[in-house]
Image: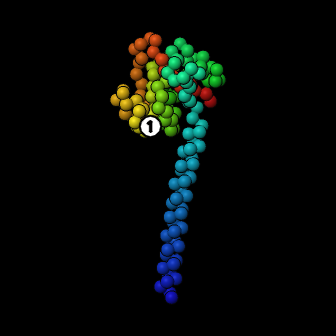
Amino acid sequence: MKQSIDDLKAYTQKGVRNLQKQLRALKTLMEENARRQHIPVFHVRSSEGGYKLSFNQVQQACIERGAKIATPAQLQAAWEDGLDVCAFGWAADGKIYLPIRYPRPGCGSSRSLTTGHKGWIDQNASGKADVYCFKL
């Protein structure tokens, strides 16, 4: 009888430790999710659809949303906080960025990009993309 009580006690303690571990993991996920919900950088596409904005048009698209064009540093910070958008968009430096965190099929594969905040100059002055805006 004593052995079964000791076994039950050990099993219960193991279960409590496991639940505490799961609770810590859940709390971490909830904190990360809360941070992501407060990322001040957001993606905007034209009302006409994706990749329709020239660099000359993007400032107005952000102003209409009470924001300004995100700088590369703001975009980088947002990416580090969890921003993961599979869409090419202008930043304030006149470059087009693809702030992906997790590679996936159909997301930038034609540009041979790897995970991360990527940027390059659009050599075509009539180039079109979406935009990343910043608003506190």
Give residue 14's position: percent from left, percent from top.
49, 70
Q: Amino acid at mark 1?
A: Arg
Relative to 114, residue 58 above or below: above
Q: Quadrant of the C terminus?
A: top right
Q: What colouring method underlies this structural image? A: rainbow
Question: Can you name the residue that lies furthest to the bottom here?
Answer: 1
Residue at (54, 23) in percent of width and height: 49
Question: Can you name the residue that lies furthest to the left here?
Answer: 112
Would you say residue 55 is visible in this rendering? no
Q: What secondary structure is found at the residue carrying circle 1?
A: loop
- Rendered image quadrant of residue 57: top right
- Rendered image quadrant of residue 124: top left
Residue at (55, 58) in percent of width and height: 23
Give residue 132's position: percent from left, percent from top.
53, 25
Would you say residue 8 is visible in this rendering? yes
- Rendered image quadrant of residue 37: top right
Q: Which residue is mark 1?
A: 101
Say few, some or many: other residues with alpha carbon within 10 Å of mark 1 (under 14 / 14 to 19 / 20 or more): some
Relative to 6, residue 80 above or below: above
Near-viewer residue (30 or 107): 107
Near-viewer residue (64 or 30): 64
